[in-house]
Image (cartoon, grey):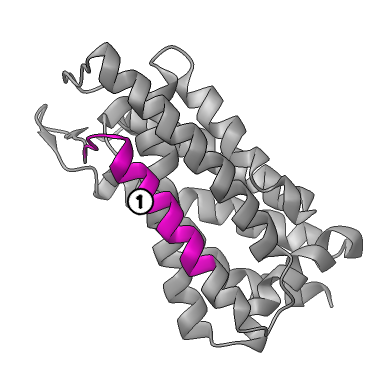
Amino acid sequence: MIDPVAEVRSFVRAALVTPVPRDHTESDAAFRRRRVVAVVTLVVGSVVLTLALRIPPGDPLFYAATVGLAAIWTIGAFVSGPLHLGRARTRSGGDARPLVQSLALGAILLAVFLLGGFVIAHVPPLRDPVTHLLDHARLGSLTLVAAITAVNGIAEELYFRGALYSAVGRRHAVLVTAVVYALTTVGSGIPLLVLAAALLGVLTGLQRRVTGGILGPMVTHLTWSLGMLLLLPLVLSSGS
């Protein structure tokens, strides 16, 4: 008979706790170069992100700004040095690309945020800033916004869980990258967006530590962000 508790523990250990063995050692010169590129990319990207989040919904400039931001994260990530897709542990004891685990983690995080959405839907000071942010999809092209959301999710993971994670060093990489990721959203003036970035940053950072690559964080990020884009407006409308 299957023990649900044991299954959950096994899943958490495999997905978020026990690293898959690998050797991604870099020379000191390569590590210093990665740090310089990561810092420059972070400064430029943070400025562009702050400006993009302040563009009024419906303004075509928002699309150009967010696509430009994705380009900044992506170029900085690849220029910084080698990036790895990573591997995940399987139930059989082997390893594979981290797809199923990441989809599950993204879905769980999405469910948690949607449940929280039902709460903030009845608290206007919390609901209204989030609704304003989602107006980019309501007042513009949902298809285009969804595509940009996907592209930016991939670009952010290339940089934050790829280049920046490798530049920080192994000891505090999960914490540092999660904090920095959250701080880049402070300019939006939306506290719940900062909290969301922090939680997503911790989850994807743990995945990066375990798998040694960016594929798992990408899948989790896309599952969560696209789900929020499509479902959160329905949840928030329950309080209006």
**Residue displayed at 80% across by 53% down:** 189
Q: Secondary structure at mark 1?
A: helix
**Image location of residue 110, percent across then percent down:** 53, 55
**Image location of residue 196, percent across then percent down:** 63, 47
Amino acid type indicated by mark 1: Ile
Q: Main secondary structure of the magenta part?
A: helix
Residue 8: tell me if it is visible: no
**Quarter-of-image position of residue 111:** bottom right
Specify the quadrant that holds the C terminus: bottom right
Residue 215, relative to residue 81: is it above or below?
below
The residue singled out by tag 1 in the image is 75
Residue 198, relative to residue 139: is it above or below?
above
Q: On the picture, is 132 further left or further right than 125?
A: left
Residue 105, relative to residue 209: is it above or below?
below
**Which stretch is magenta?**
66-84
Residue nearer the viewer, 13 or 188 = 188
Q: On the picture, is 9 further left or further right than 124?
A: left
**Residue displayed at 57% across by 40% down:** 181
